[in-house]
Amino acid sequence: MRAITLLPLGLALGLVAGCAQTPAASEGGMQTASRQCFYSDQVRNFRTSNDNILYVRDTRNAVYQLDSTAGCWDIGSQYALTITPYLGSGTTRLCVGDDARIGLASSGFGPRTCRARVSRMLSEEQVAALPSRDRP
């Protein structure tokens, strides 16, 4: 009976794994293939499609879509708002899939917040396809 040595097989698998592609970071390491993130204190513009959808543009010119889970019924009339992580993590970084708290500055009943989720980062083509009134 012949013994099979696993060492050559292990070396071959190690070489193949070493050649595999890894997610490349771009623009300061913020974007990866799996995590697309922005800092809420770097948001420079926002627009709403309706009371449930908010588009924000950051200082790197990336546009993100936030979907309100409870309906920010007067978000379209806001001239300013705040966006923070829903669970206070001590950072202003929000990534796709994270929950956020949107603070509305001027509602008829004083300051109010609503909850939203960062649903996606839009490509340039997706931003261009938005109606001009919805584009941040």
Image: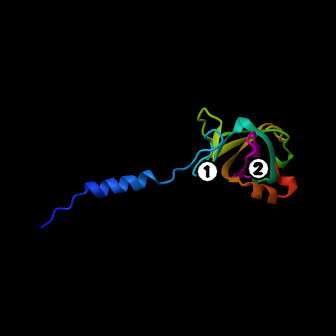
Q: Is residue 14 visible?
A: yes
Task: Identify residue type, mark 2.
Answer: Tyr
Question: Position of 74 compared to 21: left or right?
Answer: right
Task: Identify the residue position indicated by label 2 in the image.
Answer: 55
Q: Which residues are magenta?
A: 54-74
Task: Identify the residue position indicated by label 1 in the image.
Answer: 97
Q: In the image shown, does 51 or 8 lie closer to the viewer? A: 8
Q: How many numbered circles does the render carry?
A: 2
Question: Position of 132 compared to 69: left or right?
Answer: right
Q: Residue at x 16, y 62 (%)?
A: 3
Task: Identify residue type, mark 1.
Answer: Gly
Would you place residue 95 above or below residue 129 in this image?
Answer: above
Q: Is residue 58 magenta?
A: yes
Element type where label 1 sits in the image = loop
Q: In the image shown, does 12 or 94 lie closer to the viewer? A: 12
Would you place residue 80 above or below residue 35 in this image?
Answer: above
Farthest residue, direction bottom: 1
Q: Position of residue 41 (x, y in %)?
A: 72, 35
Check the picture and name the quadrant holding the N terminus: bottom left
Element type where label 2 sits in the image = strand
